Amino acid sequence: MSLANFRNLARKIICVGRNYKDHALELGNPIPSKPLLFLKSPNAFVQEGNPIVTPIGSQNLHQEVELGVVIAKTAKGIPRSEAMSYVGGYVVALDMTARDFQDEAKKGGAPWFLSKSFDTACPVSEFIPKEEVQYHMQSITGLTADRICKRQQRFEE
């Protein structure tokens, strides 16, 4: 099975929120003691180079650059020592957020789904197989969008 077609194979997009301390503080959000997970549905994927469509009614669309990890096989309750054997590769992704929708949802204690999972809310690059990536996770310090460094923080932070 080729993971190059991951956008059509995906059943869900699992995202980690507030994983960058500085950005959480910038937005006035508390730093969670455990990972804050949320989902995007696969219809949120859009291949790089295609338009991002602002949801009707939103006036405040934000982007965050993310390292997307493509999981190659079903994973549930696996030991940390085996985690990398489940990784098939990587993509550069944008986490698009209709911030005005999200702010309204937060006020009412409602889920963020509409603010995070609209069509085209997850633009992604071409798939990069993990065998083609030479890295040390501790040395990755930033990702860029439109050639502008949006965030620079070490992963262990």
Image: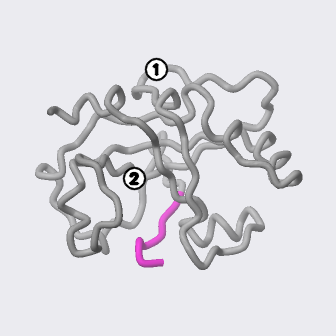
| Magenta stretch holds residue 154 | yes
Q: Where does the image place residue 8, in percent across and percent down from the top left?
A: 34, 26
Q: Amino acid at mark 2?
A: Leu
| Magenta stretch holds residue 84 | no
**Quarter of the figure that contains the N terminus:** top left
Q: Which residue is mark 1?
A: 50
Q: CA distance from mark 2 to mark 1?
A: 19 Å
Q: Is residue 73 above or below residue 51?
A: below
Q: Where does the image place residue 22, in percent across and percent down from the top left?
A: 62, 70
Q: Is residue 55 above or below residue 129?
A: above
In this rendered view, identify the residue nearer to me: 49 or 112: 112
Residue depicted at 63% across the width and 64% down the height: 23
Q: Which residue is mark 2?
A: 67
In this rendered view, identify the residue nearer to me: 115 or 53: 115
Q: Where does the image place residue 5, in percent across and percent down from the top left?
A: 26, 28
Label 2 secondary element: strand
Q: Where does the image place residue 95, in percent across and percent down from the top left?
A: 54, 44
Q: Main secondary structure of the magenta part?
A: loop
Residue depicted at 63% across the width and 41% down the height: 116
In this rendered view, identify the residue nearer to me: 24 or 114: 114
